[in-house]
């Protein structure tokens, strides 16, 4: 008979409910492969906290939940306090269940980029009769009076709805020297470079500025949009910049429709179309391929429809075999699409639970309220599990 947590002492209640969380992980979450094995098998899942999202408590709770759900990587802002929050969430998850540590990735940009911006306005300039549509469309609950800067991740949905055109866009580029220092920490495993794929000079300046800090990494990812006929030449140019000093694996993040996965099921179509075009290209440079931008609960279904979900291919040469890696004992076979990164949609489904918890208890560490933790974990597992199934 299942015992309700209600009516027990606070300590025993929390302990029993955390045991339920641990039991769920043991029974439902797939036996984990290493992040590198997941890339090779096509079961890689990355949580995107947001390149500009800096609410450290929310990030800590997200990291805890998705670590328990079995993600392979957690991607966050290149900010020391944010990186610390991610790692605190991971440790808290490992204190609940014997889960393996996901890689921690930081995101940077080589030039202006949608992911590296904030909204800003002066609330004193807003007419008192304004219906404040900005508050209604913000998926991050980042507008209350003015903009809560740490919560804004730059989705841009507030810009066009302001009836008085009061909301401004503030863009920025991450400092390369501060980024290099972060990469030398022992709790950062990977970097993602966001680029428009056209300005190879800016890309080279960023890459060269990172210098020897790249040697500390397990993975270098490049996130870029679909450039049509220019996509492959751009990838080759960027790979030529990286290759002389690339001592780890590399990944290409196919950014279909940025920051839109929470809008609706159809938002994933552009990422899938991008994957189809690159999967068919025989002359693309080395590196894993991963979907992002509009990814949601419909992404795996879409990949299955086009025959790309966990589809394997054979490496053409020794270099590619080394980069793409081995699947078990077969050193020449690897997944064409290595996995999926989830951002807005992943944050949305767990964020609903976090908001309910905060409305009842205020700002809290989610493990202090295990019933909410279990609810959030079930939501996260339902998403992560679609990729992890084999």
Image (spheres, grey):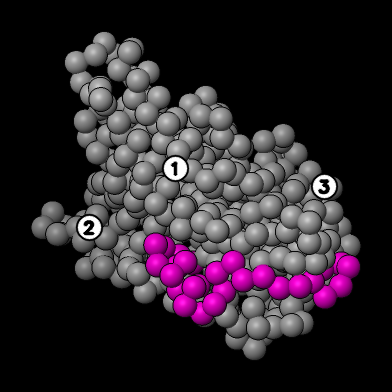
Image quadrant holding the C terminus, namely: bottom right
Q: Position of residue 43 (x, y in %)?
A: 58, 57
For the residue labelled by badge 3, is the local secondary structure a helix, a strand or a loop?
helix
Q: Which mark is residue 215?
A: 3
The answer to whether residue 125 is above or below residue 317 is: above
Q: Magenta span covers which residues?
A: 293-320
Disc 2 element: helix
Gap between marks 1 and 2 measured at Cα: 36 Å
Quarter of image, res 22: top left
Please say whether residue 269 is visible from this viewpoint. yes
x, y (%) of residue 207? 77, 59
Sequence-earlier tag: 1 or 2: 1
Q: Nearer the viewer, residue 121 or 193?
A: 193
Circle nearer the N terminus (2, 3): 2
Residue, disc 1: 28
Of residues 152 and 125, the one nearer the viewer is 152
Q: Determine which quarter of the picture holds residue 332.
A: bottom right
Task: Report the residue marked by disc 2.
Answer: 136
Q: Quadrant of the N terminus?
A: top left
Circle 1 packing at 10 Å, graded few (<14), some (14-19), many (20+), is: few
Cα distance between the residues tagged 3 and 1: 36 Å
């Amino acid at each position: 008979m299942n015992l309700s947590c209600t009516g027990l002492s606070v300590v025993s209640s929390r302990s029993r409910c955390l045991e339920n969380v641990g039991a769920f992980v043991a029974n439902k979450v797939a036996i984990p492969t290493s992040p590198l094995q997941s890339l090779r098998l096509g079961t890689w899942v990355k949580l995107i906290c947001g390149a500009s999202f800096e609410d450290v408590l929310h990030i800590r709770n997200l990291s805890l939940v998705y670590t328990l759900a079995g993600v392979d990587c957690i991607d966050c802002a290149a900010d020391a306090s944010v990186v610390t929050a991610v790692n605190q969430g991971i440790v808290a998850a490992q204190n609940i269940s014997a889960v393996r540590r996901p890689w921690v990735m930081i995101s940077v940009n080589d030039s202006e980029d949608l992911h590296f911006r904030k909204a800003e306005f002066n609330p004193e300039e807003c007419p008192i009769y304004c219906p404040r549509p900005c508050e209604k469309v913000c998926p991050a609950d980042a507008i209350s009076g003015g903009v809560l800067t740490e919560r804004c991740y730059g989705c841009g949905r507030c810009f066009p709805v302001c009836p008085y055109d009061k909301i401004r866009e503030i863009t920025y580029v991450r400092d390369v020297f501060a980024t290099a220092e972060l990469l030398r920490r022992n709790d950062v495993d990977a970097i993602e470079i966001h680029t428009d794929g056209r300005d190879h000079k800016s890309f080279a300046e960023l890459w060269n500025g990172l210098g020897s800090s790249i040697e500390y990494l397990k993975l270098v990812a490049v996130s870029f949009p679909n450039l049509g006929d220019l996509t492959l030449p751009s990838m080759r140019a960027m790979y030529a910049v990286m290759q002389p000093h690339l001592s780890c694996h590399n990944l290409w993040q196919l950014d279909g429709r940025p920051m839109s996965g929470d809008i609706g099921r159809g938002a994933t179509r552009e990422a899938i179309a991008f994957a189809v075009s690159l999967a068919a290209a025989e002359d693309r440079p080395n590196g894993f391929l991963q979907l992002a931008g509009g990814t949601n609960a419909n992404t795996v279904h879409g990949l299955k429809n086009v025959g790309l979900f966990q589809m394997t291919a054979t490496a053409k040469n020794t270099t590619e075999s080394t980069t793409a890696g081995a699947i078990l004992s077969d050193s020449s076979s690897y997944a064409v699409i290595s996995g999926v990164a989830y951002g807005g949609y992943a944050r949305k489904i767990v964020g609903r639970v976090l908001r309910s918890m905060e409305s009842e208890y205020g700002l809290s560490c989610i493990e202090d309220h295990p019933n909410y933790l279990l609810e959030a974990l079930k939501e996260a597992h339902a998403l992560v599990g679609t990729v992890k199934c084999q």
